[in-house]
Image: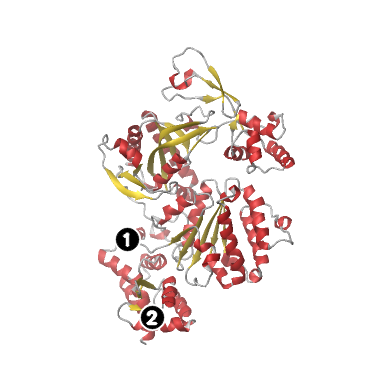
C-alpha cells in the first residue's frame, strides 16, 4: 500500500497495515484519518519502556548469557535491533513494542509485560504543546530518502539555563511554539525537539529557506517590544542530503552535516549548504553571501557555504551593572558570565570535533589565556546533550600520590568514578599480576564506559603539573594516547572523548612521540582581537575611543587576563586610564605579581636570563637561540617573525628593559 497516496477523506475509522520488514518481523501501525491533515501524520500502535525492576531482571539475564548491555553484537542480532535502540531501552525511553518484546525474547524472557512499565508510555522527547505540530514518519520500515533538513538553535541557551532555568525554559517554549507554527505554514515536518531548537524535514529547498526567513522575521517582530533579558537569539542551518528512518528514529550523516552548518551561522543568520544554495539562488530575493569553503567535522572534504544575514535588527545587548562586576578576575570565567568572550572559529571547531567518536582535543596556551574557561564550556555543552562528563584538575594531586605510577592511576580511576557518582570498584578490578596501565585501561573499558551508555567526556586540566614527574608522564600520557588509538577499532572506546588542557610555559621536555600531545586536534588559544577587546570594554561600560583602544592593545596585547584585569580596575574607578599606561610595567602597577612570576622563571635559567637581557636592550627585532625563542614564545613573552623575535607587547618590553637598564 502506498501510504503517501492514502486519501484522508476515506470514511473508515482506522486502517491497520502490516508490513514484513527486512528483519523478518511483522510490524503493525494504525492510521486514523481524522488525525491526518496535510501533514500526513501517522501514529504507531504502541511503544513501551522498561520499568526499573524490569531492567534489573534483564541485566541479570544478559549476565547469564555473558553479554554486555549494548556492546555485544550477539545481543543486537538476537534482539533484531540496533545498539542505539538498546541504549534507549536501558535509559527507559519508549521504543517500539515489537522491538521491546524482541529484546526480552533474546534473553529468554517471554513475560515481557513483567518487564514493561505499563503505566507510562508517553513520549518524552517534546513538550506536550509542541507534539501537536510534529508530523511523524511511518518509521517502522527502514527507509532512505532525500530530504531538506532545517535545524535551529537558540544561541547561548545553556548559559541562560545556568542563570535562571525556569525563565529559560519559558522563553524556549514560547519561541519553539512560534517556530513550529512557521513550519506548519510552510509544510515542514518537525522531526525532533532538540532542547533548544527544532529539526525539521522539507521536500522543497525553497520552502525550507522561506520557512527559515519567516522564522527570523517572526522572532524579530515579537522581540521588538521585549526586554533584552526576554529575548533568545536563534540561528539556522539548512542542508539537502540523505536521511534514514528506522525503528522510530531519524538518522544519517545528513543530520550531522546540517548540525555542522548550523554552527557556522551567527545569531539571527541562516546558513545554507552548496546543495541548497544551488536550488534556491534563482528564486529568492534575499541577498545570499558566500562564506567560502569550510571544513566540517562530518565531511572529509571542504564544502562551500552561504548565508542570509540576520533579518532581525540588531537588538541592544543587556550590559551588566557596575555592581554586577565579579571579583578580581582570576580563575575560570563562570559559565553564565557576560564577561566571557567566545573566540571563533576555534571554539566552534571544538564543539564540532567533540561530536566525533573517540575525539581528543588539546587546549594549549600560556597561563591565564582561558583554557580552563573553555574546558568548562565544552563539558557543560556535552552534559546538556546527555553525555556523561568528568573534570579533573591535576593541581589537586598531592605529591605523595605522584610518588609512583601505580598510586597515581589508582587515584585517577577513583576520582573519575567519584565525579561520575558511581560505586568505587577499583579494588575489584585491579589485578596485582597486571601492570597499572593495563588495570586502569581495563577499569575504564569494562566498568566506567559500560556505565556511560551515552558516552563519556573527560576533561583533564593543568596537565603540565605532571611534567615535573617523568615517571608518571612516561606511563600516563602514552596510555591516554593508546585509548585514542583504540577508538579507531573498538566501539567501546569510540564512546570516550578527551580534552587535555595544559600551559605551554614549562612545556618542551617531553617525548612528543609518546604523549597525547601530538595526536587529536590541537587548539592553541590566541589573544583577543581588537573587536573583542572593544566588546569587552563595552561590557565593562568603558567608553573607549579608538585611540584608547589602540593604546590598551599596544600595552597589553590581547591577553585575556591582562585585558580583563585592567578593565576591572578601570570600571571600579580604582585607577585612571593614564595611570594604567604609566604604572602597568612597574612595581606600583596592577601587574606586579604577574610580572614577578615571569621574572622568577627567567632568573631560574641562566641561559634564558642572558637572552632576555639581550632582548631587553635591543631596540628592534633580533635573532636569538632557537631553544630560548621556543621557551619565551611558550611563556607568551615574545612574537616570532621568521628567525627574528620581538616583545609581544609593551608591558613585557618596558618591564624587562627597566630591570636591565636600572
Up the image or down, 110 lies above or below 76; here it is above
Q: Residue at x 51, y 50 (%)?
A: 382
Up the image or down, 322 lies above or below 629; here it is above
| Residue 132, horizontal then vertical, whole percent | 47, 28
Q: Nearer the viewer, residue 371 or 486?
A: 486
| Residue 340, horizontal then vertical, whole percent | 42, 58
Q: Residue at x 32, y 37 (%)?
A: 213
Q: Secondary structure at mark 2?
A: helix
Q: Mark 1 — residue?
A: 534
What is the crowding at mark 2: few (fewer than 14 residues within 10 Å), some, or many (at least 20)? many
Residue 238 horizontal side relative to residue 445, left or right: left
The answer, for residue 404, to whether it is visible in the render is yes
Up the image or down, 279 lies above or below 335; here it is above
Q: Secondary structure at mark 1?
A: helix
Q: Nearer the viewer, residue 315 or 3?
A: 3
CA distance separating discs 1 and 2:
28 Å
The answer, for residue 495, to whether it is visible in the render is no
Q: Residue at x 59, y 33 (%)?
A: 94
Up the image or down, 321 lies above or below 309; here it is below
**Label 1 or label 2, whichever comes before in sequence order:** 1
Q: Residue furthest bottom?
A: 662
What is the crowding at mark 1: few (fewer than 14 residues within 10 Å), some, or many (at least 20)? some
Q: Mark 2 — residue?
A: 656
Residue 88 horizontal side relative to residue 531, left or right: right
Q: Kindly indicate whether the residue at mark 2 contacts the one at mark 1 (C-beta within 8 angstroms).
A: no
Q: Nearer the viewer, mark 1 or mark 2?
A: 2
Amino acid at each position: 500500500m502506498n501510504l503517501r497516496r492514502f486519501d484522508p477523506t476515506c470514511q473508515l475509522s482506522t486502517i491497520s497495515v502490516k508490513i514484513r520488514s527486512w528483519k523478518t518481523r511483522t510490524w503493525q501501525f494504525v492510521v486514523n484519518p481524522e488525525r491526518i491533515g496535510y501533514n500526513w501524520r501517522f501514529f504507531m500502535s504502541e511503544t513501551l519502556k522498561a520499568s526499573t525492576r524490569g531492567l534489573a531482571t534483564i541485566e541479570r539475564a544478559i549476565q547469564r548469557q555473558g553479554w554486555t548491555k549494548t556492546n555485544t553484537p550477539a545481543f543486537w542480532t538476537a534482539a533484531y535491533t540496533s545498539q542505539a535502540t538498546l541504549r534507549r531501552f536501558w535509559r527507559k525511553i519508549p521504543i517500539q513494542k515489537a522491538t521491546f518484546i524482541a529484546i526480552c525474547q533474546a534473553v529468554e524472557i517471554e513475560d515481557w509485560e513483567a518487564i514493561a512499565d505499563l503505566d507510562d508510555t508517553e513520549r518524552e522527547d517534546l513538550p506536550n504543546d509542541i507534539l501537536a505540530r510534529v508530523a511523524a514518519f511511518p518509521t517502522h520500515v527502514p527507509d532512505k530518502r532525500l530530504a531538506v533538513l532545517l535545524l535551529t538553535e537558540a544561541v547561548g541557551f545553556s548559559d541562560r539555563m545556568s542563570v535562571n532555568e525556569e525563565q529559560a525554559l519559558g522563553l524556549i517554549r514560547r519561541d519553539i511554539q512560534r517556530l513550529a507554527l512557521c513550519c506548519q505554514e510552510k509544510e515542514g515536518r518537525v522531526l525532533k525537539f532538540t532542547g533548544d531548537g527544532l529539526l525539521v524535514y522539507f521536500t522543497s529547498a525553497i520552502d525550507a529557506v522561506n520557512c527559515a526567513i519567516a522564522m527570523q522575521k517572526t522572532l524579530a517582530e515579537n522581540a521588538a517590544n521585549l526586554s533584552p533579558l526576554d529575548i533568545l537569539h536563534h540561528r539556522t542551518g539548512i542542508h539537502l542530503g540523505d536521511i534514514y528512518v528506522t525503528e522510530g528514529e531519524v538518522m544519517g550523516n545528513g543530520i550531522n552535516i546540517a548540525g555542522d552548518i548550523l554552527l557556522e551561522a551567527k545569531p539571527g543568520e541562516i546558513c545554507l549548504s552548496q546543495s541548497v544554495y544551488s536550488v534556491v539562488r534563482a528564486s529568492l530575493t534575499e541577498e545570499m553571501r558566500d562564506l567560502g569553503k569550510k571544513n566540517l567535522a562530518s565531511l572529509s572534504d571542504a564544502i562551500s557555504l552561504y548565508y542570509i544575514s540576520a533579518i532581525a535588527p540588531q537588538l541592544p545587548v543587556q550590559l551588566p551593572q557596575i555592581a554586577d562586576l565579579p571579583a578580581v578576575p582570576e580563575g575560570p570565567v563562570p559559565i553564565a558570565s557576560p564577561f566571557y568572550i567566545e573566540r571563533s572559529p576555534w571554539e566552534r571547531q571544538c564543539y564540532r570535533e567533540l561530536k566525533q567518536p573517540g575525539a581528543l582535543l588539546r587546549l594549549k596556551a600560556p597561563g591565564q589565556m582561558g583554557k580552563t574557561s573553555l574546558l568548562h564550556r565544552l563539558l557543560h555543552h556535552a552534559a546538556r546533550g546527555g553525555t556523561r562528563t568528568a573534570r579533573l584538575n591535576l593541581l589537586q594531586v598531592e605529591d605523595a600520590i605522584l610518588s609512583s605510577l601505580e598510586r597515581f592511576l589508582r587515584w585517577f580511576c577513583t576520582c573519575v568514578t567519584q565525579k561520575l557518582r558511581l560505586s568505587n570498584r577499583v579494588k575489584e578490578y585491579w589485578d596485582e599480576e597486571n601492570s597499572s596501565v593495563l588495570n586502569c585501561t581495563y577499569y575504564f573499558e569494562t566498568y566506567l564506559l559500560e556505565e556511560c551508555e551515552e558516552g563519556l567526556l573527560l576533561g583533564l586540566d593543568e596537565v603540565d603539573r605532571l611534567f615535573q614527574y617523568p615517571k608518571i608522564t612516561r606511563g600516563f600520557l602514552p596510555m591516554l594516547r593508546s585509548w585514542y588509538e583504540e577508538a579507531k577499532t573498538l566501539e567501546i572506546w569510540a564512546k570516550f572523548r578527551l580534552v587535555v588542557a595544559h600551559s605551554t610555559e614549562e612545556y618542551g621536555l617531553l617525548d612528543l612521540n609518546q604523549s597525547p600531545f601530538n595526536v587529536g586536534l590541537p587548539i592553541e588559544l590566541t589573544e583577543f582581537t581588537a573587536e573583542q577587546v572593544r566588546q569587552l570594554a563595552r561590557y565593562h561600560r568603558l567608553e573607549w575611543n579608538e585611540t584608547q583602544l589602540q593604546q590598551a592593545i599596544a600595552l597589553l596585547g590581547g591577553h585575556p587576563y591582562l585585558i580583563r584585569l585592567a578593565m576591572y580596575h578601570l570600571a571600579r574607578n580604582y585607577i585612571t586610564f593614564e595611570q594604567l599606561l604609566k604604572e602597568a610595567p612597574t612595581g606600583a602597577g596592577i601587574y606586579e605579581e604577574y610580572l614577578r612570576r615571569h621574572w622568577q622563571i627567567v632568573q631560574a635559567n641562566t641561559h634564558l636570563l642572558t637572552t632576555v637581557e639581550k632582548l631587553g636592550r635591543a631596540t628592534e627585532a633580533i635573532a636569538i637561540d632557537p631553544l630560548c625563542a621556543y621557551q619565551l614564545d611558550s611563556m607568551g613573552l615574545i612574537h616570532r617573525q621568521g628567525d627574528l623575535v620581538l616583545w609581544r607587547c609593551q608591558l613585557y618590553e618596558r618591564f624587562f628593559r627597566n630591570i636591565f637598564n636600572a
